[in-house]
Amino acid sequence: MKRTNTVSIAQILDEVLGEYKIIGRLKESRIIAAWPEVLGSLAKPTDKLYIKNKVLFVSLSSSVVRNELSMMRSTLVRCLNEKVGEEVITDVVFR
């Protein structure tokens, strides 16, 4: 017997995640997980990261690093979104 209506696991997962409305949270968590990978050693003084309304908020303990990251803001947004493969954030706010 031959099956004609085969569906990939990726399609099923996208459908289930979309139905339960958690696909956005999953993408946001991927952005936060990619933060240390994108920044490397500059990620050490960062404290808390969270996303609200497509804006990544980052708490920093070093004013020097805050100033340096502020100048790299647009590059960081682009690199983080590329890691996820979709535009998840539009801006970064350093506190």
Image: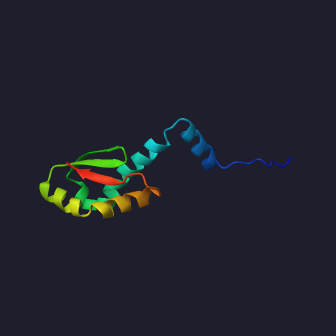
Which residue is outermost to the right? 1
Residue 3 drawn at (x, y percent): 80, 48
- Occupied quadrant, residue 17: top right
Residue 1 drawn at (x, y percent): 86, 46
User: What residue sits 70% from the left and 48% below the top?
Assistant: 7
User: What residue sits 66% from the left and 50% below the top?
Assistant: 8
Question: Relative to residue 11, is residue 64 depicted above or below?
Answer: below
Residue 28 drawn at (x, y percent): 40, 46
The residue lying toward the viewer, choosing from 85 and 87, is 87
User: What residue sits 55% from the left and 41% below the top?
Assistant: 18
Residue 56 drawn at (x, y percent): 31, 49
User: What residue sits 47% from the left and 58% below the top?
Assistant: 85
The residue lying toward the viewer, choosing from 88 and 65, is 88
Left/right of residue 74 with respect to residue 4 in the rendered view: left
Left/right of residue 40 with respect to residue 34 in the rendered view: left
Left/right of residue 29 with respect to residue 94 in the rendered view: right
The residue lying toward the viewer, choosing from 64 and 77, is 77
